[in-house]
Image (cartoon, coloured by chain):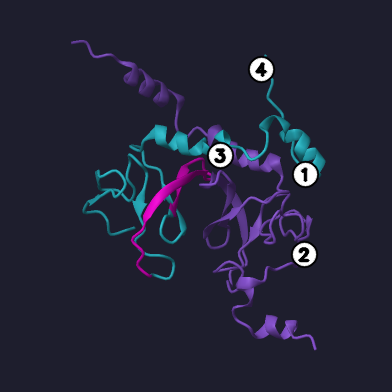
Chain colours: A purple, B cyan
Amino acid sequence: MNRENKRRKYDKKYFRAHPCTDSFICKNCGWPVVSAGAGSSHRNHCPNCLYSIHLDKVPGDRSSECHGRMEPIGVWVRKNREWAVIHRCKACGKISSNRAAADDNPMKLMALAMRPFGSPAVPQENIRSLTISMEEISKI
Amino acid sequence: MKEKCNGWVCPNCGRTVWTDHCPDCLSGIHMEDEEGIECGGVMEPVGVWVKTDGKWEIIQRCQLCGEMSTTKMSSDDNYMKIWSIASKPLASPPFPIEKTEELTRIMGGSGSIKWRKTE
């Protein structure tokens, strides 16, 4: 008798030891995503547009009621020099980070890393005056 | 993060601060998490995010519980530290940057690199 389905339904700690292997269609770009090929058994975001869906409170538990689209807003480097994508939920604003998968679109990842450099939030004039003030030699 | 207007000492660099994050090292204190449970870990700056209106926000991550949050960049923040955090991913790419276009084509992804030509 196969009790796996019963365990999946009634065991509340099932998700901690068993990764979800469902395939899905990306709600943002329509890319068909399968769980294989991510480099790990936990597929979190669409490899083409890097969007995710806000499903979890604790990784894997599927208990969040938000179900909003999570937009990639940046990347950061972990201690082991591995990249992780930072997601922000468009509906509730929750921020979470997730490991970049092996088959993520390299172009989109680089675009995320380059994004701060294209905005004029820190004007060039400020940086120039900063470097000038740093290069000043005080004469005694 | 709201009741810190009477000054606190930055646990990372020891400076007395009146805003919600230290302007020198950009770290803060994680007062309480989403459910309202006290945490008290040090929030280290992890990344920079550009909002749709062009303003920057600093993404912080709690060293104790791992929760992420954002704070607004103020005008007296250390620009060099912000640039250093923003350029960290570029300095250690997981794949060769010069092969980005080729890799994307092999994987069947979308997007292309177009440099604007100057006259």
Element class at badge 4:
loop
Cα separation between marks 2 and 4: 45 Å
- Residue nearest the viewer, comparing B42 with A126: B42
Residue of label 1: B109
Depicted B86 relative to depicted A62: above or below: above
* Mark 3 residue type: Pro
Kindly identify which chain the residue marked by label 1 belongs to. Answer: B
Question: Which residue is at the far top?
Answer: A139
Magenta extent: B37-61
Q: CA distance from mark 4 to mark 3?
A: 28 Å
State the predominant SS element of the stretch in magenta.
strand
* Image point (52%, 35%), residue name: B87
Alpha carbons under labels 3 and 1: distance apart = 21 Å
Read off the residue under disc 4. B118
Q: CA distance from mark 1 to mark 2?
A: 18 Å
Whole-percent x, y for residue B16 in the image = 23, 45
Between B62 and A87, the one lying in front of the other is: B62
The residue identified by callout 2 is: A23
